[in-house]
Image: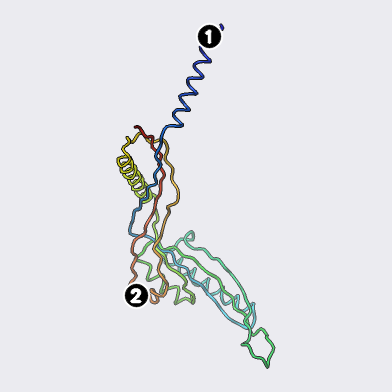
Amino acid sequence: MRRLALITACTLILSAGAGHAQDSAPKLTVTGEGEAVAVPDMATVSLGVSAQNPDPGVAMNEASEVAGAILARLDAMGIAARDRQTSDVGLQPIWNAHDSDRPREITGYEASNRLTVRVRDLDQLGAVLGAVTEDGANRLSGLSFGLQDPDPVSEAARRDAVADAMERAKVLAEAAGVTLGPVLSISESGGGYAPSPMPMMEARVAAAPIATGESTINARVTMVFELAD
């Protein structure tokens, strides 16, 4: 029984020693970066509606009526409810111009709200822009392009990042005169999706040509390799 206990204790010591030796083995840590590009197949439009009136209630009603007309038009054009979102509904006073002879006073009110619209058919984008401006959208604040399904592009970017890390590791190991061993760990950090932004001033009228450009997805991985002499 004592002999069995002694053998077990020796086995544990040897196992712990092997684990410690592995932890203290030389390692190489590298970071690889990759990217993949694709032609966008979706656009996101940010537009706004504002109305001014001496009566705050009237101003709110006027803005709401215009927003309702725009939503009805989008319905008619087949833009799904999930692709429209209203935000930043507000009401603020309008003050008279600064004049030292007159005290500051409120002369009216401005009601506003913002609507974000995703257009999944880019062939329809020009018509959507023309329709919403015709129906009373008077603030066009942004247009960006993106991908409806970015996963395949993300995977390509990750593969590119891993290949970059592997190549860096090989070059460093060769320069140091050591042998590159197996991968001990790999992790992903940073990276992300970079849609193609476009100032709304470039799309002032529905007939104007719109260039979609490319959407880029970046990836970054950190890999740890074991080294051998």
Give the percent coordinates (x, y) of residue 142: 45, 69
* Quarter the N terminus occupies: top right
Q: Nearer the viewer, residue 180 or 58?
A: 180
Residue labelled with disc 1: 4
* Amino acid type of the residue tagged 2 in the rendering: Ala
SS state under label 2: loop
Q: Relative to 98, is 5 above or below?
A: above
Residue 204 percent across, percent down from the top left: 40, 76
Q: Position of residue 130 (x, y in %)?
A: 41, 74
State the scheme by which the image is colored.
rainbow
Which residue is located at x 34 percent, y 53 percent? Answer: 36
Question: Mark 1 Cα within 10 Å, few/some/many (few <14, many 20+)?
Answer: few
| Residue wearing tag 2 | 208
- In the drawing, does residue 67 fall left or right of residue 212? right
Instruction: Single out the mark in the foreground, 1 or 2.
Output: 1
Look at 38% across and 71% down and name the residue there. Answer: 127
Q: Which mark is residue 61?
A: none
Q: CA distance from mark 1 to mark 2?
A: 87 Å
Q: Position of residue 165 (x, y in %)?
A: 35, 45
